[in-house]
Image: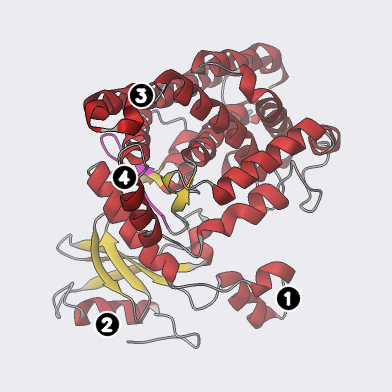
Amino acid sequence: MILDNYGNLTVKGVEVYVKDKQLFDADAHITVVDLHAVKESIEGFVNLIYHVYDENGKSVILKQMLNLPRMRIEDEQSDDPHGQLNEWTLDLGRMRSEIATLIFWNSVYKGICPDIYLFDEENRIIVMEDLMDLSLLRFDLCRMIKHTHFAKKIGQFFAHNLFYSSNLHLTNYKKSEVERFFTNPEYNALEHFLFEEGAGVSWDRPSLPGLEEIRGKIINDQAVQIEFKRLHQKFAQEKECLIHTDLHSSNVMINHNDVRIIDGEFAGFGPIAQDFGRFTGSLILNYLCWFGDASRTATEKTDFQNYLLGAIRELYETFQSEFKALVCKYRNDSYALKNLDVDAYLTDQFQNALGYTGVNALSRLAIRGLCYDIARLPEKDQLLPAHLGMEVSYELLKHNRNYESIDNLIEYLKAFQVRNLAKC
């Protein structure tokens, strides 16, 4: 292999490696593309990601976990330390966990994740199915491309994942064994950013000028801070099922007939409401970004926002109907299911998901970490959607227990069109 000074593959090294592993013929003409520059994800800070293909159309994605986070490597090269992040190291366990997680999720919902072709633990390398004919959902949403199938598939996946990896289906002994198998040292990688440094709980990360009042309202509201602490404790301690933890719209790949979930490095056992909140927060921030986008007509923006509201509704309705079908199918075989109040259980899940939506949306509204949906706008147009994002987050953290169904959330978001369209 051809490695750099940090023991990581170079572009030339990737070509040598895939031929040595007989993934490509020895005489194949191979092209290697470094995807770090074009893929918006925290994963780019901890992995090298290459698209590898030959002249016959054969292709794979190769990922190598860095010895150190990219930011630490850049700091060493530039002598510009980033404080706490400069102390962050990486654990190979996260790569093992990702592979096991992707395989498990494909077993509970076939085709939801890319297939794994090779795991080379010694060299920290995964080779997997090429999904380059798919786009990141976040970028498609920011181009107003409508996909009518992703919400249903993700809602079905959430139901299957929750059911089959929790004690709703597993015995206590079997769940403890599965939970132990999927123990991931990187599960809490987002914990600091969500619950300790997020824009709604701390002033540590600066936000856009003009957000001080609404941000102070959130930080100084005792009820909201109590809810933050409750959700933090739930995230850290509740081992409900196997969750992604970082399932935003840049970790979903899509085309006209396919949907894939990627980047499971931080997966572990936790509350399914976090995955709902991370994903719903992405959709809501995209919904709000159009209030700051002057490049589209009011009609175009309203039409696309209504599409997004429909997707959010379908996500939750599909999850609930699919979950109820699984309960009905297995109820006679499970003591836990026989005694489950399904409607109350789903209402509690929904309200927790709204709280996590507020937490996760706020984590993407500070300048460092500002979501692409808003960051792509001219600077002068970013304030309104960012302010609305904080307003929504405040509402969902403070009043999520007042929301009994998805209709309540849709009605609340719909009102923003009336109130804010004239400001666009």
Of 396 and 206, the residue lying toward us: 396
Element assignment for label 3: helix
Is 254 in the magenta? Answer: yes
At 40% from the left and 80% from the top, the residue drawn is 10
| Residue at the (65%, 11%) spot, across then down | 418
Q: Label 2 is placed on what type of residue?
A: Val
- Residue ID at (61%, 28%): 288
Tell me the quadrant of the picture where the N terminus can be found. bottom left
Q: Circle 1 — which element?
A: loop
Q: Which residues are magenta?
A: 253-264
Depth order, front residue of 201/31: 201
Report the side of 334 relative to 291 (left or right).
left
Relative horizontal placement of residue 322, taking residue 386 as reference (left or right):
left
Using the numbered discs, state the Cα–Cα distance from disc 2 to disc 4 in whole angstroms.
47 Å
Mark in front: 3 vs 2: 3
The residue carrying mark 1 is: 80
What colouring does the structure picture have? secondary structure
Question: Dot 3 corresponds to which residue?
Answer: 318
